[in-house]
Amino acid sequence: MKYFFNGNFSAINKLEFKTSQEEDLQTICKFLKENYLNYKNIKFYIFDNLEKKQSRDPNHSISKASARFEPFAIYRFWNPLDNDKKISDSHFPHELIHLIAHKFTKPYTWEVQLDIVTGGKIIKKLEMQSTSFMQEGLAIAVEDIVFGLKLREHEEEKTIDEWCKNQQYANNILEQSINFDGFCNFDNDYIVPFTASFSKFLILNFGIEKYKTMYVSIREDKTPKDNIKIIEDIFHFSQSELINQWSNNL
């Protein structure tokens, strides 16, 4: 992997960061049953200032870390001297998981309108795998299963299953949220734990290979009904049956 540090990083900082990414890449690839060597061309652009990261990020996202598929790169704000562990920790597997999953199969092209840090919007044609709902689900599920990380929403940290236990989800919640527009209609602290916990349930109960088959089969340019039909055909259960099984496993 290649690293481009932008800012005041010591030699020790750089070594720590590189070592963390190499460790995480190997760990994720082992779990996802992917060849580690296929991902050695990932580029990291690391900034000690959030505004610099947001400016250089091709999509100008407000987030502290972003995976970009077309340059096959991660843009990340990292301040090793910050007292906030969520920033200072050099490990951050979430975006690596996105990039690894992007090579499960040949991507498709999808045009979408995105929010940017200035408050405006841009229209982008993106290389895409799966749907935004399932992309986030996989990344956060692997963080939970493999790294034991909790999900942080509104300054509160809980496991993805704990987030879901006290919330009510309809039997057709998948159809409501499986595509981008529906996914964006829900509050993060409601829908993000669900997609992660549901992905975790599918992976642990049906295996990573069957999950990956589903992951690459659903698409944003298919209707929600079509995507649900794909999921039902792969796992051999109806949407409501899968939701009930997931809920009973919490």
Image (cartoon, rainbow, N blue to C red):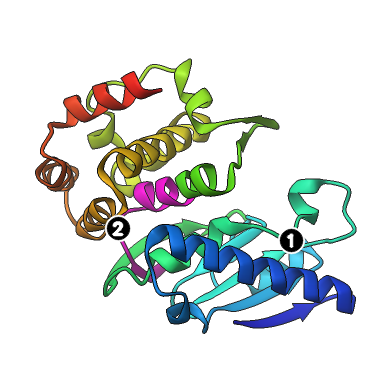
Quadrant of the image occupied by residue 59: bottom right
Quarter of the rendering occupied by the N terminus: bottom right
- Asked if residue 112 lies left or right of residue 150, the reply is left
Q: Is residue 47 above or below residue 62?
A: below
- Asked if residue 135 lies left or right of residue 8, the reply is left
From the top left corner, tell me how far across and down residue 179 is, in percent: 29, 47
The foreground one among 131 and 182 is 131
- Asked if residue 193 lies left or right of residue 11, the reply is left
Quadrant of the image occupied by residue 175: top left
**Quick one: label 1 or label 2, which is nearer the N terminus?**
1
The magenta span reads 124-139
Residue 131 among magenta residues: yes
Q: Secondary structure at mark 1?
A: loop
From the top left corner, tell me how far across and down residue 187 is, in percent: 48, 32
At 76% across and 55% down in the image, what residue appears? Answer: 89
Quadrant of the image occupied by residue 241: top left
Distance, label 1 to label 2, CA atoms, is 28 Å
From the top left corner, tell me how far across and down residue 46 is, in percent: 72, 72
Q: Amino acid at mark 1?
A: Ser
Q: Amino acid at mark 2?
A: Ser
Estimate how packed mark 1 is, as few (under 14), some (14 to 19) or many (20 or more) residues with alpha carbons within 10 Å. Answer: some
Q: Secondary structure at mark 2?
A: loop
At 61% across and 42% down in the image, what residue appears? Answer: 149
From the top left corner, tell me how far across and down residue 7 is, in percent: 84, 75
Determine if residue 122 is in view.
no
Q: Which mark is residue 130?
A: 2
Q: Which residue is mark 1?
A: 90
